[in-house]
């Protein structure tokens, strides 16, 4: 009986959730390694920020030193209410003061925010403008991006695993959990990449062999189990030949075998999980007294690309500790 209910839920999702998922890949022109920590954080902020103005969700990502991959989900033009479209139209600053767009303006904007070329081009161009100003340069920075439409379920799980394993294949880390700039690590630290993560539980239900009782659990426990089973799938991922070609005797062909060979744990225990959360609470920011953070803002605000006035944020969970920026569910 319960199996039938699960099947109905999955079929309902596939019929009702009229969206398209894209795997996006792009490289810096000439393969230049321009993405340091500050650049990666800025690019990530722009990808997240674009979701409030346009009609897409960021399902996964990995930011490397000279390229990036991301998976975005775009709804059909009928899935957002007129009021919501108008709200996003005003957020883009197309009018000096909030107003009702004309019918022509409304239709044109609604088409744009559901178009993958416009969506990706927008956050890429915003980053190029910021980077060019910061570096005193002009001109393009990225090649033309590649996009692939991803089928739900097995294909989605495969592509998420593929981009998560990028820093492992590149030889930067042995375990992807040790690479800061990817959705997988962020999710392990903070549980949610986006408010729509619940759609992934149903999307990946069959391909990850999730237990049947998962849909009866509270949402946070659903996500915890989802990423536990996703990690089990990662541990079975094969290593790229170039990763171990320097050692022909290395017989490790999966992530699990590689970790065991290096004496690393495949399980993420409490201590490692805690350190992972701390890393996301402190990476790339200033943390200390309010006076200290305000001083950093006044001296480095322009370098960080802040146009609007910023102030130190009270961390609240720790007395008198302030941060440079707010965090998405840091603990």
Image (spheres, helix red, strand yellow):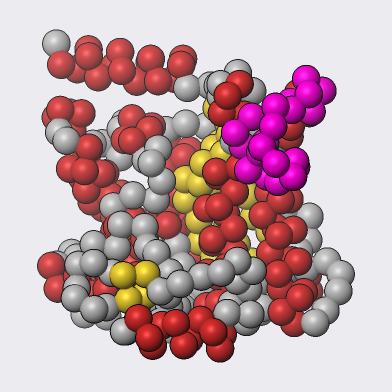
Does 321 sit left or right of 35 as displayed?
left
Residue found at the very far front of the displayed protein:
97
x and y percentages locating residue 53 in the rendered image? 61, 42
Residue at 30% x, 40% y is 208
User: From the image, which quarter does the C terminus lie in?
Assistant: bottom left
> Bounds of the magenta span?
86-106
Q: Is residue 43 magenta?
A: no
Does 3 sit left or right of 187 as displayed?
left
Q: Is residue 91 magenta?
A: yes
From where the camera sits, is residue 163 visible? yes
Vertical comparison of 122 with 10: above or below:
below
Give the total number of marks visible in the rendering: 0
User: From the image, which quarter does the N terminus lie in?
Assistant: top left
Q: Nearer the viewer, residue 175 or 311?
A: 311
User: Hey, which quadrant is residue 315 in on the image?
Assistant: bottom left
Q: Nearer the viewer, residue 237 or 96?
A: 96
x and y percentages locating residue 248 in the rendered image? 44, 80
x and y percentages locating residue 146 in the rendered image? 71, 50
x and y percentages locating residue 100 in the rendered image? 70, 27
Residue at 69% x, 32% y is 99
Residue found at the very far right of the displayed protein:
139
Residue at 29% x, 63% y is 330
């Amino acid at each position: 009986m319960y199996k039938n209910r699960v099947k109905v839920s999955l079929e309902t999702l596939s019929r009702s959730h009229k969206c398209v998922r894209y795997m996006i890949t792009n490289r810096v022109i000439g393969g230049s390694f321009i993405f340091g920590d500050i650049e990666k954080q800025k690019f990530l902020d722009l990808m997240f920020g674009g979701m409030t103005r346009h009609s897409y969700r960021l399902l996964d990502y990995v930011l490397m030193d000279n390229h990036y991959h991301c998976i975005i989900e775009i709804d059909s033009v009928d899935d957002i209410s007129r009021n919501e479209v108008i709200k996003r139209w005003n957020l883009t600053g197309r009018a000096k003061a909030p107003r009702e767009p004309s019918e022509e303006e409304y239709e044109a904007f609604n088409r744009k925010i559901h178009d993958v070329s416009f969506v990706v081009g927008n956050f890429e161009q915003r980053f190029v403008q910021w980077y060019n100003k910061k570096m005193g340069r002009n001109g393009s920075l990225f090649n033309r991006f590649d996009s692939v439409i991803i089928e739900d379920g097995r294909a989605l799980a495969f592509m998420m695993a593929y981009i998560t394993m990028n820093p492992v294949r590149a030889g930067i880390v042995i375990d992807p959990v040790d690479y800061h700039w990817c959705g997988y690590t962020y999710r392990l630290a903070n549980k949610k990449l986006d408010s729509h993560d619940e759609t992934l539980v149903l999307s990946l239900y069959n391909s990850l062999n999730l237990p049947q009782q998962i849909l009866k659990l509270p949402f946070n426990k659903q996500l915890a189990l989802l990423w536990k089973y996703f990690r089990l799938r990662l541990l079975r991922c094969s290593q790229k030949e170039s990763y171990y070609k320097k050692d022909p005797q290395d017989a490790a062909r999966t992530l699990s075998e590689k970790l065991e060979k290096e004496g690393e744990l495949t399980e993420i225990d409490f201590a490692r999980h805690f350190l992972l959360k701390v890393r996301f609470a402190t990476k790339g920011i200033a943390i200390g007294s309010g006076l200290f953070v305000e001083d950093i803002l006044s001296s480095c605000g322009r370098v960080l690309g802040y146009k609007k006035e910023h102030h130190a944020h009270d961390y609240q969970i720790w007395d008198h500790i302030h941060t440079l920026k707010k965090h998405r569910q840091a603990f």
